[in-house]
Image: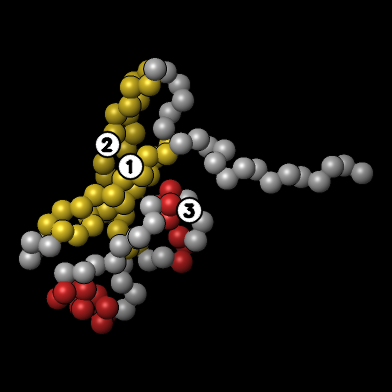
Amino acid sequence: TPPAPRASPPFLAGPQIVLSVYGPDFFGHDVVRGYGAVHVPFVPGRHKRTIAMFVPESTSRLQQLTSWFTGRRPEFTDPRVVAQGEGREVTRVRSQGFVTLSFNVM
């Protein structure tokens, strides 16, 4: 009989850089502007990566209205949520632009 397939390690793809971008809102509160993640290249040289940013959304209109008045918008408390795709499929997010990152790998 053939050997049973082995599960791959969770961090097989290598290290990642996780971005959390914050900025002031209309009322001057510091709120999240976007989250994103990118894998660090292994090959030596100059690399440029464009990262799609996203922000979590409230699930109901009442929560959206309350968060707008209070200045407290939804945020991720654990940066691993951004780096791992697992479990994020049930989170409502909105696209929020792009960030371009340049790497110089030696």
Q: Please, what secondary structure does the residue beneath circle 2 have?
A: strand
Which residue extends farthest left? Answer: 27
Residue 94 in sight: no
Residue sitting at x 53%, y 37%? 13
User: What percent of the width, then of the height, locates residue 52?
Assistant: 32, 46
Query: Which is nearer the eye, 21 or 97?
Result: 21
Residue 23 vertical placement versus 26 (above, below):
above
Residue bearing the label numbered 1: 51
| Neighbour tally class for label 2: few under 14, some 14-19, many 20 plus, Cα within 10 Å | few
User: What percent of the width, then of the height, locates residue 1?
Assistant: 92, 44
Q: Please, what secondary structure does the residue beneath circle 3 have?
A: loop
User: What percent of the width, then of the height, locates residue 94?
Assistant: 31, 60
Q: Which quadrant of the structure image shows residue 64? A: bottom left
Mark 2 is on which residue type? Thr
Q: Nearer the viewer, mark 1 or mark 3?
A: 3
**N-terminal label among 2 and 1:** 1
- 3D distance between C-alphas at marks 3 and 2: 21 Å
Rendered image: mark on residue 85: 3
Q: Are marks 2 and 1 in contact (CB under 8 Å)?
A: yes
Mark 3 is on which residue type? Gly
Mark 1 is on which residue type? Ile
Residue sitting at x 36%, y 44%? 18
Q: Please, what secondary structure does the residue beneath circle 1 have?
A: strand
Query: Which is nearer the eye, 11 or 93?
Result: 11
**N-terminal label among 3 and 2:** 3
Residue bearing the label numbered 2: 100
